[in-house]
Amino acid sequence: MQRAHLRPASVAEVRSQWRARVLPTLHGTVLDVGAGDGSSRTHLPADASVTLLEPHATSARRLERLAARSAGVRVLPAPAESIPLPAASVDTAICCLVLCSVMDQDLALEEIRRVLRPGGRLFVLEHVAARPGSWACRGQRLIAPVSRRFDRGCDPARDTEAALRRSGLRVVDLRRLDAAGPMGVRIPHLEGVLARPDRAPSASESA
Ligand SMILES: C[S@@+](CC[C@H](N)C(=O)[O-])C[C@H]1O[C@@H](n2cnc3c(N)ncnc32)[C@H](O)[C@@H]1O
């Protein structure tokens, strides 16, 4: 066996491979939650109607300049916890490395579920907490206060899988993978697809 095959892809590779594989398949109205520099836009089909949601003022201004040059793109300078869009108005939402940063994951996911049309899908790629009790998890908890302070609220120790599973969205596919971080540290990621159910779950289903 070649040792090179044991090394996971870097975080940047995982992100760019995910974008290249997933984003060109999306259609209709697409909401990019925490759009950052808007680079996901270049992978989306040209006929998609794209809303870039970004609460950070400097990034949102940059995105406005991008939107001015691109047909079918608009910017909403707002957080995921309060999305200024009508209910059931979005075909697809994307969360790429953003649920680590939102203030309130449950509220953000509730909002995403609200704006998705029934059957609409949420595509996620997130870095997530390592296994509880592991050294990696301890390390993540140690650096969390620093990264929250200096990396736009990013908390590397978030249990995003649990938040997704209690979001009321139906899990279509959710899988964990490792990416190689600095000094070969393995950074756990979560990739998947969830769908807004066609109807609200009954009391017995949600119990
Ligand atoms: C690591 S960047 C990822 C950017 C982009 N999704 C990408 O894949 O390149 C995280 C982004 O989430 C944004 N963000 C932070 N808190 C947020 C919130 N509450 N709602 C939406 N976006 C948020 C940050 O401003 C930043 O642009």
Image: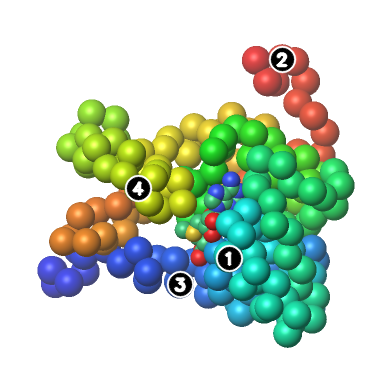
Give the structural element (helix, strand or loop) at label 2. helix
Give the structural element (helix, strand or loop) at label 1. helix
Give the label on residue 59, or none: 1
Figure quadrant of the N terminus: bottom left
Mark 2 closeness class: few <14, some 14–19, many ≥20 residues within 10 Å: few
- For the residues marked 2 and 3, what is the alpha-carbon distance in whole angstroms? 41 Å
Give the label on residue 16, or none: 3
Which label's residue is closer to the chain start, 4 or 3? 3
**Frontmost residue, 191 versus 53:** 53
Mark 3 closeness class: few <14, some 14–19, many ≥20 residues within 10 Å: some
Would residue 131 appear left or right of 47 to someone viewing this image? left
**Disc 2 vs disc 1: Cβ atoms closer than 8 Å?**
no
The residue depicted at 43 percent of the width and 35 percent of the height is 159
- For the residues marked 4 and 3, what is the alpha-carbon distance in whole angstroms? 22 Å
Mark 1 closeness class: few <14, some 14–19, many ≥20 residues within 10 Å: some
Q: Nearer the viewer, mark 2 or mark 3?
A: 3
- For the residues marked 1 and 3, what is the alpha-carbon distance in whole angstroms? 20 Å
Residue type indicated by callout 3: Ser
Looking at mark 1, is its residue's CB closer than 8 Å to ligand 1? yes
Would residue 112 appear left or right of 190 to someone viewing this image? right
The residue depicted at 68 percent of the width and 63 percent of the height is 52
- For the residues marked 2 and 4, what is the alpha-carbon distance in whole angstroms? 40 Å
